[in-house]
Amino acid sequence: MRGQTKWKKKQEYFLYFMMYSIIGWIYEVFLEVIVYRWGFSNRGVLFGPYCVVYGFGAVVLLFSLYRLKARRITVGKFSVTPVLVFAGIVFLTTVIELAASYLMEFTRGEWLWDYTRFSFNFEGRIALNPSIRFGIGGMVFLYVLQPLFSRAVEKLGEKKVAVISGLLALILAADCICTFVLKLL
């Protein structure tokens, strides 16, 4: 029974990974098409409508900040827990983005963004402005979206979670094969 519970948890976290990867892709396309008016292009590394760095970042935030988020840390009568969570999100997402840029550069010869136009940037890989935006988005994710997604996944039941996560895993695996392996042939 305990093994089933661990497997179910892994399936749930995979669903969260995929949901946030898709939300990240939508966010990136929104910025590109609506905000910057550059026209549409697939903003992910893979073919499908997902940016896996967002899914990975979301899962890292879930595992890293859930205990802090649950605590009530105060200075006087003022709760500073949300401020600490925000700072944690900014730090973690900035480190993830920096690592992702180096990983992409190593595997693809380039990374998909350029922050040189922003003040306080490092090699165009990370910058204060996007880090603050990730902090705000992370707060929406942790305090608004994740509780909704948790309830929705719980309502699905164990069998549906297993089927959906299995299908999404197959799609993601096929996408990875098509994107990386077939390019080498």
Image (cartoon, rainbow, N blue to C red):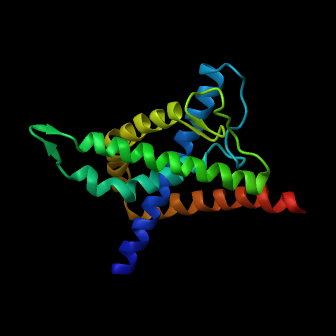
Q: Which residue is most to the right?
A: 185
**Quick check: 163 left or right of 155?**
right
Q: Residue at 39% of width from left, 80% of height from top? A: 3
**Quick check: 119 left or right of 145?**
right
Q: Nearer the viewer, residue 6 or 110?
A: 110
Residue 95 screen position, x and y as percent: 52, 50
- The N terminus, quarter of image: bottom left
Q: Quadrant of residue 140?
A: top left
Q: Quadrant of residue 142?
A: top left
Q: Residue at 70% of width from left, 41% of height from top? A: 112
Q: Residue at 58% of width from left, 57% of height from top? A: 168
Residue 102 screen position, x and y as percent: 67, 53
Residue 130 screen position, x and y as percent: 53, 34
State the count of labels: 0
Q: Is residue 169 above or below residue 3?
A: above
Q: Nearer the viewer, residue 2 or 92?
A: 92
**Quick check: 96 left or right of 45?**
left
Q: Is residue 63 above or below residue 115?
A: below
- Residue 148 visible within the image: no
Residue 35 screen position, x and y as percent: 59, 20
Q: Residue at 76% of width from left, 57% of height from top? A: 107
Q: Quadrant of residue 12?
A: bottom left
Q: Nearer the viewer, residue 25 or 83?
A: 83
- The C terminus, quarter of image: bottom right
**Quick check: 40 left or right of 149?**
right
Q: Is residue 182 above or below residue 18?
A: below
Q: Which residue is most to the left?
A: 77
- Residue 159 visible within the image: yes
Q: Is residue 147 above or below residue 14?
A: above
